[in-house]
Image (tube, grey):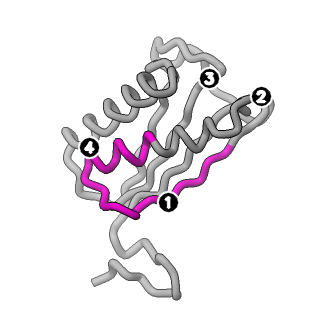
Amino acid sequence: MPLVRVEIRKNPDPTFAKRIGEQIYAAMRSAIGVPEHDNFQILAEHDEQHFIFDTQYLGIQRTDNLVVIQITMNEGRTLEQKKLLYKTIAESLNSELAVRLEDVFINLVEVKKENWSFGNGIAQYAS
């Protein structure tokens, strides 16, 4: 069960953040096998004073169209799966929404399965 957080600067298109989320969900389904209906996302837009980033860190030239994606998910995916996920997300955002590859910033947070409760105060994945 991934939990996806997307952070962007305010966009004039009110559907833009949602469309980013749709591309991320499709990429997770194809690249790492996330099941249908396992889609939980928090999409946030910020003004320039509340969205701070370095425009040149690691020699990557970022613009104000930066998309910051944080995905919290169960541990256990291989390095190859993670690399495929990063590539699939970036290429999808680029081809479908014209987001520059340089403007796709992804952070994965892996947790143990017992660290989730999907409701009812129960740890559904705990053994």
**Three-letter amino acid code of the residue under disc 3:** Asn
The image shows residue 12 at horizontal and vertical percentages of: 74, 29
For marks 4 and 1, the one nearer the N-term is 4
Q: Which mark is residue 40?
A: 1
Other residues around mark 2 within 10 Å, as few (<14) / some (14–19) / many (≥20): few
Q: Which mark is residue 65?
A: 3
Which span of residues is magenta-colored? 23-44
Q: Secondary structure at mark 3?
A: loop
Judge whether 21 appears above or below 76 on screen.
above
Q: Secondary structure at mark 4?
A: helix
Judge whether 37 appears above or below 63 on screen.
below
For marks 2 and 4, the one nearer the N-term is 4
Between 97 and 111, the residue placed more toward the observer is 97
Between 127 and 37, the residue placed more toward the observer is 37
Please give the name of the residue rendered at 52% of the width and 19% of the height, measured from the top-left corner.
57
**Three-letter amino acid code of the residue under disc 4:** Ala
Between 29 and 5, the residue placed more toward the observer is 29
For marks 4 and 3, the one nearer the N-term is 4
**Three-letter amino acid code of the residue under disc 1:** Phe
Residue, disc 4: 31
Judge whether 92 appears above or below 3 on screen.
above
